[in-house]
Image: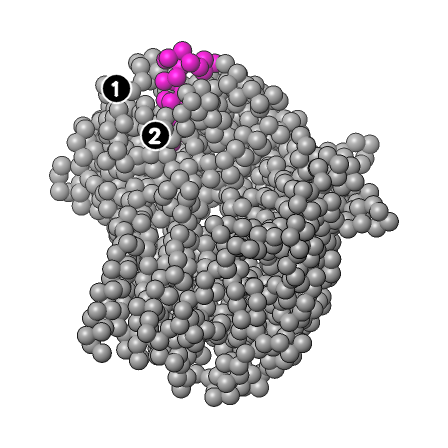
Amino acid sequence: METSITNTIAIFDKLLEALNQKNAPGYVIGVAKDNQTIYQRATGLASIEFSVANTPTTRMRIGSTTKQFTALSIMLLQEEGKLDLDAKVNTYLTDLSGPNGQATLRQLIGHTSGVRDALESTAFFLTEGLFPQIPAGLTHKWSSQFTSANFAPGERWSYSNYGYMLLSLVIEKVSGLSLAAFFKERIFKPLGMVDSELWPNDMELTPGLASSHIKLPSGGYRRGIYPCEELVGGGGIVSTADDMLKWMAHLRQPDRVGSAATWEEMSRLPTFNNGIEHNYCFGLKRQKYRGVNIVHHAGSTIGSTCMMMTFPDHALDIIVMANRSDSDPSGITLKIAEALLADVMGPATVAAKSTGREFLAGNYYSPTTKLVFGIKVNAEKLAFLMTGMPEGFLKDEEAGLGSDSTSGQFTLHYEAPQAGARLEQIEFENCGIKETLIHLPDTPPATQDLAAALTGKYLMADFGQQVEIILEKGVLYIDLHSRYKPCRMRLDALSSDVFLFSASLSGAPFHGIVVMERTANAVSGFFLSTARTRNLYFSRNQ
Amino acid sequence: MKNDTTQRLDEIFQPWNKSDAPGLVVGIASKGKAIYRRGFGLASIEHATANTPQTRMRIGSTSKHFASIAALLLAEQGKVDVDAAVRTYLPELTGSAGNPTLREMMLHTSGLRDPYDLPGLFLHRGFAHMASAGMGLEMSQRFSSTNYAPGERMVYCNNGYHLLSKVVERVSGESFEDFLKNHILDPLGMADTALLASDMQITPGIATLHLPQADGSYVRGVYPSGELLGSGGMISTIDDMLKWLVHLRGKKKVGSKRSWKQMLEKPRYSSGATGDYCLGLTREIYRGVEIIHHAGAVLGGTCQMLTVPEHALDIIIMCNRMDGSAPALALKVIDTVLAKSVLQAPNDPLPAKKFKALHGQWYSPHSHRVFGVMAYPQAPDQEPVLALSIHHSVSGVLKKSAGGLAINNPGHGVVELHVPKTLSKDLKSLDISDSGHRERYVRLPQKVTNAKQAFKGLTGRYRYADFDTEVAITLEEGTFYLDLLPSYGQCRFKLEPWSDEVFGGSLTGTAFIPLPTNVTLAIERKAGKVIGLWLNNLRTRNLWLERCS
């Protein structure tokens, strides 16, 4: 065992040498096998400003890797009889009167709630494109105003940070403690995770925390400050490699925090309303990688990233945290795992080849849900896009051609067209629900021809924010009429009613889909969708 | 230098000598030789790094005179005329913002409105946000009015220096950062000095700025602009600044004799009165010796750069905490380093109780200007002193002057009270000069009988047209508020009626950006109906809010 570990350390060191830069931020990595830490290393700088290096004990943000702690907290309160996992969230947050209040705690935990998150997309409009530092409480205030949800509770899967914000509020309400205090008292202290804490606000200063860095296209880094002052149960924990290894050991053999029933519940694959299973358990994904069972969750804040992954059947725990946006903790984690478990791993799933399937390329539209799905041939592979954003490559899986995505796993079913004919539709199976997607025209109609029907003022549902569709120099835009600075979203037609929108949100590209609503042949409104917001409605304002 | 002086200096800075709190860096030179170079406290609480003499810090508004030199260098090359209207170089300023000259902007006599002052408050609507590049210039274009006509008087205006920096960029074709580096900093070997336009930019060796909180913790200071230029965006070290001060006093490598003469020439306002604020540098007498200085303040830090030319004493103090008070410390340094024989007795503030007849709020119905005279507690164990407020913001301590009593605040210029020879308790009117402009002020009763009747028709909505935004006057449990109608939280001024026409307002609620906190409001009526409000504060004059519902 020792010899192989020495070899392994040499392998890891070689792997990480490429990351070992003195003039850039870096990584903190910890690896444990059979409950023994076998590797702990840091590379790069905790702070470029102060020339402080990352060390194996440097504290880092773990982002969404926080979610499992929030989920466990709910279970601990259920053990005490203080709440019921299957009760609706408005049982505890009594002023949550809209559809967001109808989801159960279990659905919020599993991202099947369908709750709308105002921080995604809506906030862009409400701040007239400015997207400033969002003060504590505002996300919840705005999100509570929605009179529609992304989908009915339990129906589908869509990652929701707001769901975890609601869970945070429930934990605080029911326990009488702040979430930070609850985590500390009930989880961190009992497990000896002494350097871990909830740290919601990047504007406040805590010792020993590596600075977050955003890579600039011009080279160099900018300060990473999360644009919201309450990074809570969805992603606010700060931790160390030691603490996370302690946590993973307990995850595999829970003996101090949480009852046996709790851990059994949290390990079971959840189901949608239709009984189909999905793999997002209690803040952790449970699936296979190259035939080996893994339990993992990634994290990403502004300027910090994380991957926590354990291979429970092999007692292999890996934590990789980076304080730079240009990092690949997932890739590094898998390379480390492969170095140790190569002989028990099966072949890697590769992207499907496009050869013979070029007819799939194009944009597809669901008349039932207004989903827009795209396929592009890219380097002999089939890249796919959800709501206009590229997300990965299709794979030939057991169930068929498909992939994991921001909407969960999906599989495509189709009948290959005759030679020379065109594929007119695809069946898209997602969350056990099948829907037919219509292949949109290869050549969309000219903007000029569409403009007259679309231009004019529109009002955002639930908030009354006004925008205007305008035509300028042959290009269609949604103009936010921002008081702060000119803010426009460019519209490119995919069909006469379906458009791709492109804008800039705090300097980063912001894309999605706009679908026109017609009533008696006239445009009466439009629906705007992004990866995590479905069909935000704007009505025509005459 | 004598050990004794070092010891006394150590005593001055001792309160900042901590290993768990942010502090300051200080550099003192006498006759061109550094006699004291220290860092106190931490550069960063997060990374447990101490301040050292090498630590870089923000100098804030001390940047302004660098921007002036930059403009004058371009003038030397015949590329700008500092007495031309700014519109000449920024033609997009088609409105009144284009009228002032570059010199007027440098003297703070431009009368330009500052989009980051009161008007910005209306736009912020309770949000802290980073103004992106171009926003300052773009917002300046929207103003349909100014504070006053160019050249009239001095009121500190950051926007003037911001636009000046844009002129330097436009005319030189270089970024302001590069211009400073290429034409001023590199020639003088100031290798650690630079422009840092945004607190989100990462640069090595710089201290974190800290805002102390009530519970003893600190919040990061991030200035709400991503385009901090000549108005306050530079960073430096004590050694670089001491190098700069030697240059300022002596032989010039950067800038001609003529340029430097202009830098230190005292201005004359349209009233005929002169002022002490030159082109980004203040020249005044302290305890009988001339000092040249300019302070700086950013979010989470303060700075004072000061020289006593006739004694070749150079002082630079930069703090990385908001409560650092560099200007006061610099004066203490002068008191300590210069021999008592050289310094005259200080012009002490006056005991407030001696001038009880002057206490109160004084109002000019013509200009809506409000000056307040009050007792101000300087130190807990000392008698309160006489102080002056400008539009409800305490602005300075009143001292004896040629015409009576005056403050000479580097941010505002001279305000002089023409105190009558005999002060009677029921003094009803008082002449006050502001940059030499004399007006008659009437005493406000500071209470209103039958407020309900007096302020009938006041509550409702008002519109600030330039930024296309509405605010409201509300009445809640007998108190009036000017509510900025933020998207979230609370952002409103609590209004105290001082007469049936004038209110004093103080901001309550959201205040996490450097907002002006006090204002005065004057009601405009026509045929008995309220038609609008005139909003004033320290740096914004007569913002018109029109009644809309």
Examine the structure image and report whether residue B233 is included in the region drawn in magenta: no
Residue at the spot 64% in from the left edge and 71% down from the top edge = A432
The answer to whether dots 1 and 2 both sit on one chain is: yes
Applied colour scheme: one colour
Q: Is residue B277 visible?
A: no
**From the viewer's perspective, is B300 left or right of A18?**
right
Q: Residues within 10 Å of mark 1 (few under 14, many from 20)?
A: few
Q: Amino acid at mark 1?
A: Lys
Image coords of residue A158 (percent x, y) = 60, 64
Residue at the spot 40% in from the left edge and 47% down from the top edge = A215
Classify the position of the N terminus of chain B by image quarter.
top left
Q: Is residue A214 visible?
A: yes
Residue lying farthest to the top in this orientation: B78
Residue at the spot 42% in from the left edge and 71% down from the top edge = A290
Q: Amino acid at mark 2?
A: His
The disc at residue B253 is: 1
Residue lying farthest to the left in this orientation: B2
Q: What is the number of callouts on the image?
A: 2
The disc at residue A115 is: none
Q: Which residues are magenta?
A: B63-83
